Amino acid sequence: MAKAVTQSILVVGGGMTGLSAAIEAAEAGHEVFLVEKNPYLGGRVAQLHHYFPKLCPPSCGLEINFRRIKNNPRLHIFTMAEVEKVSGQEGNWDVSIKVTPRYVNEKCTGCNKCSEACAMEIDNPFNYGMDKIKAAYLPHDMAFPMRYVLDPALVKSPEAQKVKDACPYGAIDLDMAPATLDLKVGAIIWATGWKPYDASKLDTYGFGQYPNVITNVMMERLAAYNGPTQGKILRPSDGKEPQTIGFIQCAGSRDENHLPFCSTICCLASMKQATYVREQYPDAKVIIFFIDIRAMDRLEDFYQKVKEDQNVQFFKGKVAKIEQDEATKGLILRVEDTTSMTLHEVPVDLVVLATGMQPNTSETQIPAAVQYDDYGFVASLAPRPGIFAAGCTRTPLAVSESVQDGTAAALKAIQSVLRR
């Protein structure tokens, strides 16, 4: 082909995959545009308490990446933004990006004056709605960019002017409107990641009906120091310390009526979260209900370590139904032990559903002609010349694998724009 019209690269998605791709491409000398629909970078990793394989908080890795972004003038960040149109061909893509107003401009210093002046509260999306935040808010304490956001409901309310007047730097712009940005790029990396499968669709488990049935992503926020309970794992119904916690594996996964595939990380995520419980509550009992355990490669050692804990029981069986004791809000799990073929009713204080990873491309596809598999993942690393899928856009991956996949996509994109 002829030389690319431009050697710039667009990365769609600011999670660990997209961050890795954008930073590597920019540090290789290319102009990079990073588009993220949330008001902050870091994706779902920013919402974790600990992640594999080091079992450390994500703050250190994110901080390093944010510093690399700040030090690279070739990398341009657009948050609260989504790609609407893509046209053209490899080396010469025209892209239209819609930017949603934040109502806070670059003058913001993070002083918190707007939040202090705000009375309106909204559900906290960063904590999966488990607590409330002010409608003038910083998404989380390590948010990048470190800039506040005004909820549209606040902007439309009589309170908006009071909040604006409280800002000493003139950073609040109540008239900020949606904007459209047109770019020309040589290659596109699509790394829009995944969403937790909607547990409310599992009608026999009572999620959304029983307050003490939560999902694995919610459990991460409960254990996190900046979560709704400041890191204390407590029952949502009454704030009490749970004594018995049940983890239900394959909650909607490997099920033809929901997610037919295995997300590969859920078993290890539940075992990791079992260690959260055991560290906080030495006498607590953990029961992990499973079909089969999938702990691949070097992580088999972690599985063996968790199994050695006498307070952690691995129960081979699929939970058929959860019922709630209306008086205590305790939960009764009806399950068959598939090793003995016996039926059991197991009482627990808290249930954690290991929901799978649904690719965001199953609902919001790339605005270009590319192929998808039966589950909504992009069907290949390079579904079209000049467009590259990365991370959980194309297959379920753990954090370290997502970083590697983002780097691989950056190399492919660089090869694409340099090809003659």
Image (cartoon, rainbow, N blue to C red):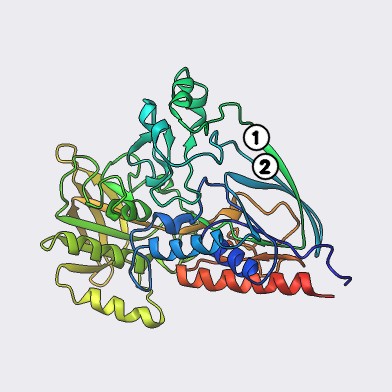
Image quadrant assignment for residue 57: bottom left
Residue 91, position as x, y percentages in the image = 81, 64
Residue tagged by mark 2?
A: 98
Instruction: Assess disc 2: are there few (<14), some (14-19) or many (≥20) residues with their C-alpha within 10 Å of its C-alpha.
Output: some
Q: Secondary structure at mark 1?
A: loop
Position of the N terminus, as image quadrant, is: bottom right
Foreground: 61 or 171?
A: 171
Image check: 408 left or right of 63? right
Residue 23, position as x, y percentages in the image = 59, 65
Contact between labelled residues 2 and 1, with CB atoms less than 8 Å apart: yes
Q: Which residue: 52% across, 56% down? A: 194
Q: In this view, which residue lies farthest toward the left?
A: 283
Foreground: 117 or 96?
A: 117
Q: In this view, which residue lies farthest toward the top?
A: 158
* Amino acid at the residue labelled 2: Lys
Q: In this view, which residue lies farthest toward the front?
A: 168
Image quadrant assignment for residue 381: bottom right
Q: Which residue: 15% across, 67% down? A: 311
Q: Which residue: 38% across, 82% down? A: 298
Q: In this view, which residue lies farthest toward the right?
A: 2
C-alpha separation, residue under disc 1 versus residue under disc 2 = 7 Å
* Amino acid at the residue labelled 1: Pro
Residue 119, position as x, y percentages in the image = 36, 25
Specify whether residue 306 is in view. Answer: yes
Residue tagged by mark 1?
A: 178
Position of the C terminus, as image quadrant, is: bottom right
Specify whether residue 392 is in view. Answer: no
